[in-house]
Image (cartoon, coloured by chain):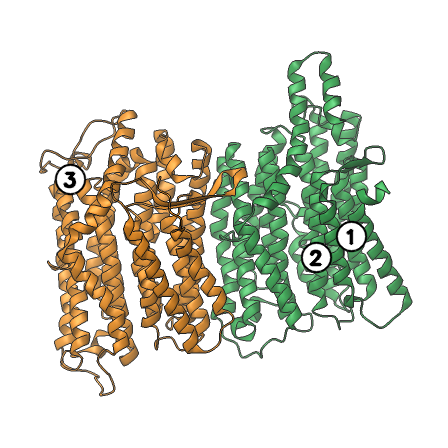
Amino acid sequence: MMHFDFPVLTALIVLPLAAAGILLFLRGERTIRLVTLVVGILECLLCVRLFSYAPQGAIFQFEEKASWVPALGMTYHLGLDGLSLYMVLLTALMLPLCVLGSWTYIGKRIKEFHICLLLMTSACIGVFAALDFVLFYVFWEAMLVPMYLLIAVWGGPRRRYASIKFFLYTLAGSTLLLAAIVAFRHVGGSFSIPELMEKSYSFKFQVWAFLAMALAFAIKVPMFPFHTWLPAAHVEAPAAGSVLLAAILLKMGTYGFLRFCLPLTPAASVWAAPVMIAISVASILYGGCIALGQTDIKKLIAYSSVGHMGFVTLGIFLLSSKGLSGAILQMLNHGITTGGLFMMVGLLYERSHSREIADNQGLGKNMPAFMFLLGLFSLSSLAFPGTNSFVGEILVLIGAFKGSAWIGFAAVPGAMLAAAYMLRLLQRVTWGSPSSFKGTWRDLSMREWVTLAPLAILVLYIGLAPSLTIKTMQPSIDRVLTNMKTKNAAMGITEDTHLAQRLHLPDLSVPDGPDQKERP
Amino acid sequence: MTIVTKLLPELWLLATIGALFIASISGRKRSVLCWLPWVAVLGVIAAAVSLGVRGELFYGVYSVDGLSQFFKLAIAAGFAIVTFIAAGKRDSEDFSPDYFMLLGVSAWGLMLLASCVELITLYLALELSSYALYALIPLRGKDRRAAEAGIKYILFGAAATAISLFGLSYIMAAKHTTYLAVLSTTSWSFADAPLAVIGLTLFLSGFFYKLALFPFHFWCPDVYQGSKNETAAYVATIPKLGAVVVLVRLAALFAPGLEITTLFAILGAISMTVGNLAALVQRDLKRLLGYSSVAHAGYIMLGLAAGTAAGLSAATFYVMAYILMNLACFYVVCAISKDGENPTLDSLDGLYHRGPALAMILAVAAFALVGLPPTAGFTGKLFLLSAAWDQGYHWFVIVAVLNTAISIYYYLGMVRHAYTGESEAPALTVSKGQLAFGSVLAVIVLLVGMLPASLYGLAARAADGLVAARVAHSLAAQAADGLAAARTAAALHP
């Protein structure tokens, strides 16, 4: 274990909390915005320390451990590995961008708004850094309240409906997760995630635990039949709320699969993989088809999220090295790209006060800088080569074709649908016949440039040099997969069987499929 | 002198009651609320100081142990909080000195109840605390609903008490003793002692009634609705402490897995489901909280059914958390009600414009009642769930978490009205001192949730002592020789 003098993760969690406390006593809109912005920049600076992460080093780095409730073996235990590192970086980056993006968008209850943003940041970093199951759950649920308020207080006209749907859906899903946590303590003797990961559990227990956890995570992702809260929440949330929702909240679901389902219930994951893959493909196709029919830009992007997150879950449940690295990269990319897109829709809404495509047509001539960035993010969203999403999606697709060509063929139309709906949006907003443009609509201001530039740079940076990112997370991914294999082998689930056979489809795949099947 | 140190919290409260009595006959116009809250705070300090005191009094019927001292602290704290809540309406005519005297007598009875380790004494203490409440509930100006609530409370109370006494007669007939210490050395399986088990089940109904557990919960929403807001705040919280302390003492008698613990689990599961489902359709806030307390009585059963040291300390911890968050909720109810009327969900509309601090306190209390981290409600529920799961009550845990999912809707409904409802009503005027008090309450709910270790440690030490007695007995029984009895006696009377 590496020892660091400075508890950087705790600092990342406590700094926004403390700032939220200070904000309570501040007055003046400008002061509040500036203080929050400075806190956001400090968060990013703190994150610089995280770049000393050594991929080949210890399993969990930047570890911090303190006693919390010794009677039940609960500990305050934080740490990062390749699965969570980039999520923490992304969360920290989003805070200052959200503050800048809402500089003029949010006009009422500014103090409370920024407190909610800060609390969200704290809780989200906590979710990704927690290495104690209860601590994870605390952050996971604590994040709901500020998000609920962001939608309910600063949202659009149907905010009451959207906010309560969001809250009920996600909380109802995660109640069974709590039962699973309690059960894991009973059989594993601890709440500590690293300790639980080392143990092996009976197949029956794994299946039940997997189902309880997967429900919570699938709602958060959201996967196909559980996605209905997402469009409502996205459409009604303020721009910053949508950005946080898309960039960070959705990732918690997929992160949950990676952190808990695969390492703790490996046999059940293999058992459930075909169904999860089927649902993922359904999400990809369904999200794409529905997005094609939308006239509201925010709704369109919300449904595109369902499709993109389908690629992530597909990558995870391919249970192969390519699939997993594609999935994690896609999580990061979706956060950057969709975050950027929602930010831009917010800017557009500030000008036109409408999210309909028809009211925002033909802006290419008058707002070239805006359209340049919208074009960049749209191309990234449809996974154009050279942008970040291309790398993630192609890795997932390679993994899919390796697993079974059928899965690959089923998922490819999703990528094509993405091109169809994003290009349609781009074409109409750029070159459509101008509908309601007014001279008062300015092109991007300096502040808006600063908000979007970091995301735009990341789109190109990850798109052109993805290996740096992949290298960091590869050892962690390999560790997850080897652990799965050895545990399953120990349980007698050793026979390598191609996914196609598990799905009862004719075999078209290349012969070195990495997956395993449970032997009855 | 020793008796004074041993009974410090009780004596302090008795002195307070005496002072209130003098105030009530002296006829002075000045409200007792000027000094009462601070005297009650001193009572909390007295109870905290005597946390470590141990001893036995009155021929072994009155035991000062970890459990009793913990609950005396909780009762003193609850009493102080209720007087602070009432202090917000100090001009109200109903708040005469005798109102608080009756409150004090009821709390005093509950303090005695916490220490009773003999069934007849226990019964007397229970009645002492109930009689004061019978008189308190109808006190609401000239409101007829309050009279109705009072009658309902008395009738239900009388019936439950009669059943209780009847059960007590069976226990005495079967076991020939009323001392808990002796009772804990005998077997409580239905096969060994059918009469005693039936008797105990009936005896418990008196406490289920106090706790408002199904099927003894019918009075609860009506009485909350009919009585004064401040009275409801008291009735909803402090008597539950008394019920739980007795149930914890009695649950320690049973080895886990007996018929009677299964009964606990079944009643608990029904209670939480019925309470939560009924609460979904309520509009009156106090009625809603009434059904919510029925559901919470069910959650407490998780720990009692487990019956282990972990389960009993979880129940002890949870009831403490419960009174804190429920009092925070009632604080808001009392603060927003105009002229002492019953607030409905609609009167919460626009609360975040009209009283932002109140809205925040309400949100903390409501989310704590849901069991959302990082509040005391979550930590308490986690302890309960893990204790029950460890004892194999998997179905009970699943029912409990599904019930959490049901309960979100109505608790969130309160927050939703406060934060997204629009209202033309004028801003609420609440004094700075009242707001500070409410904020302290909310902060405590959060702190107990985030750093529960020390409070849980107190609860655990209290419960360990109880279970140790039973474990000592079962070890002794295993030895199965003449020495066993002597060893048990040694373990019980060191």
The chain letter of the green chain reads B
Position of A259 with respect to B196 (left or right) is: left
Work out how far the residue at label 2 is from the one at label 3, CA to CA, in angstroms. 64 Å
Q: Are marks 2 and 3 in contact (CB under 8 Å)?
A: no
Task: Classify mark 2: helix, strand or loop.
Answer: helix
The residue tagged 1 is B106
Q: Circle 3 — which element?
A: helix
User: Please, what is the three-letter code of the amino acid marked with disc 3?
Assistant: Gly
**With A385 as the anchor, is A83 left or right in this view?**
right
Does residue A452 show up? Answer: yes
Q: Percent position (x, y) of residue B344?
A: 59, 67
Image check: A181 left or right of B106? left
Report in which chain the residue with disc 3 lies. Answer: A
In this view, the residue in front, B432 or B166, is B432
Query: Residue drawn at (18%, 52%), measured in percent from left and top?
Result: A392
Q: Quadrant of residue A285?
A: bottom left
- Residue at the spot of label 2: B234
Amino acid tagged 2: Tyr
Residue B13: image x %, image y %?
80, 53
First in sequence: mark 1 or mark 2? 1
Pointer 1 and pointer 2: residues touching (CB < 8 Å)? Answer: yes
- In this orientation, does residue A223 appear? no
